[in-house]
Image (cartoon, helix red, strand yellow):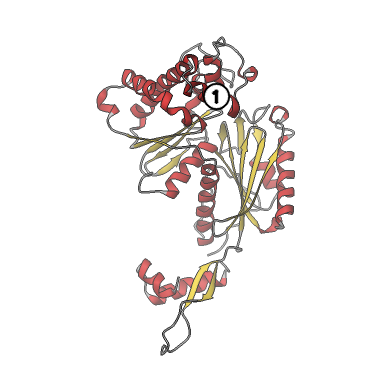
């Protein structure tokens, strides 16, 4: 965009635009390009000079941790993914002692393959399944690990000269929706992901909400029935124990509610088989989805009664079976909540797209980098203080 166009968009004076863009050019955050637009034959003067972000000014690494997988993406200052890779590890054997070394080595290998020096990476952002403590930089519990209290941020900051952050994966879906369509996803809204587990992200008063320690909105591990079905977290009666992939397979197979989730053949393939059975008219599969829908309705009733969201988004792999869950969901919602409260929200059902999580990480990273370069950076949740930390001057 040319300076004159920037002035029209921002309503700043030509002198102000020139001053600001000169500073950005000096910092190598933007580049100056000659316009390729055709000039009129009699036009005088040089072609217009256009300004664009310098994509190579700085890089960030966005990482998603899930069961047996580390997904890495190298992102430039324009917000474009320049390289990505999936690295496998054994979740069953991953604990606080072994996993940090696995993650650091995976990043080093990734940067080597991408041909990018670690010194050019300004930030590393991580999204993980489970209970994520953004204030301590740890994953307190997750199905992605065999152990508990897995340190993430501190080992990364010790290994790399970069700011490091961690977030819950469903929070990043919520951030991605707000970033991509703020007119629709703003104010107060909730995102619920039904997949390998059950997660929630909350936007309250136009800000992502993660609570005092970063573990807020653990929808899946709120209790539904005291002493009820066994959850993967070890407790009994969690919403997840009735809504997740293993819960659906357990119910459809008439397994006892105390059957250990680890022993249940669920996951992506197990859920897909169950959806196929429901589609072919199998009574057990259809009943499992219907009853799960009722449980979801009860869970939604709590969310609506407590935070009065303008919109609720349902996503995750289980949404492929929403047609079999929908009737039960509305039944549960009607039983659990008075009509006056049920009529104040809109429901969006979104096909699952794993890129949501990466998009949320990128959105947060770009915003932090912009604030950092402006000299207005505050240390947000998910980052631990570095002893030698210095702010970048404007």
* Residue shown at the point (47%, 82%) measured from the top left: 47
Within 10 Å of disc 1 (Cα), the crowding (few <14, some 14-19, many 20+) is many
Q: Secondary structure at mark 1?
A: helix
Q: Nearer the viewer, residue 203 or 283?
A: 283
* Residue shown at the point (54%, 37%) measured from the top left: 168
Q: Position of residue 292 (x, y in %)?
A: 45, 20
* Residue shown at the point (45%, 42%) measured from the top left: 208
Considering only vertical position in the picture, is 211 above or below 367? above
Left or right side of 192 for 205: left
Residue 236 in sight? no
| Residue denoted by label 1 | 245
Residue 181 in sight? yes
Q: Position of residue 25 (x, y in %)?
A: 54, 72
Considering only vertical position in the picture, is 29 above or below 202? below
- In the picture, residue 138 is in which quadrant? top right
Q: Nearer the viewer, residue 212 or 32?
A: 32
Considering only vertical position in the picture, is 382 above or below 161? above
Q: Position of residue 258 (x, y in %)?
A: 57, 11
Which corner quadrant holds the N terminus? bottom left
Left or right side of 207 for 94: right
């Amino acid at each position: 965009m040319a300076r004159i166009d920037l002035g029209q968009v921002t309503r700043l004076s030509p002198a102000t635009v020139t001053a600001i863009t000169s500073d950005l050019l000096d910092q190598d955050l933007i580049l100056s390009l000659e316009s390729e637009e055709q000039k009129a034959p009699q036009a005088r003067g040089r072609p217009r000079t256009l300004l664009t972000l310098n994509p190579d000014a700085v890089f960030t690494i966005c990482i998603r941790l899930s069961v047996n997988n580390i997904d890495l993406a190298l992102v430039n200052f324009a917000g474009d993914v320049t390289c990505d890779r999936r690295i496998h590890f054994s979740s069953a054997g991953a604990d606080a002692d072994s996993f940090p070394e696995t993650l650091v080595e995976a990043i080093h290998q990734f940067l080597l393959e991408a041909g990018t020096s670690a010194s050019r990476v300004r930030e590393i952002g991580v999204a993980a399944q489970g209970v994520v403590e953004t204030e301590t930089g740890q994953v307190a519990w997750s199905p992605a690990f065999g152990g508990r209290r897995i340190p993430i941020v501190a080992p990364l900051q010790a290994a790399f000269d970069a700011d490091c952050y961690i977030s819950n994966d469903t929070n990043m879906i919520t951030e991605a929706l707000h970033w991509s369509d703020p007119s629709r996803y703003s104010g107060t809204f909730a995102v619920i992901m039904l997949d390998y587990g059950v997660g929630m992200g909350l936007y309250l008063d136009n800000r992502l909400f993660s609570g005092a320690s970063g573990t807020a909105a653990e929808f899946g591990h709120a209790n539904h029935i005291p002493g009820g079905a066994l959850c993967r977290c070890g407790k009994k009666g969690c919403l997840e124990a009735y809504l997740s992939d293993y819960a659906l397979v357990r119910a459809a197979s008439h397994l006892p509610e105390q059957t250990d989730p680890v022993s249940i053949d669920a996951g992506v393939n197990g859920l897909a088989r169950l959806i196929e059975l429901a589609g072919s008219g199998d009574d057990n599969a259809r009943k499992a989805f219907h009853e799960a829908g009722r449980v979801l309705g009860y869970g939604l009733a709590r969310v609506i009664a407590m935070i009065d969201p303008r919109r609720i988004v349902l996503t995750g792999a289980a949404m492929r079976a929403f047609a079999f869950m929908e009737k039960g969901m509305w039944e549960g919602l009607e039983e659990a909540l008075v009509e006056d409260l049920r009529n104040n929200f809109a429901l969006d059902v979104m096909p699952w797209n794993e890129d949501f999580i990466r998009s949320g990480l990128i959105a947060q990273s770009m915003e932090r980098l912009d604030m950092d370069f402006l000299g207005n950076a505050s240390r947000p949740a998910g980052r631990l203080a570095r002893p030698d930390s210095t702010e970048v001057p404007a």
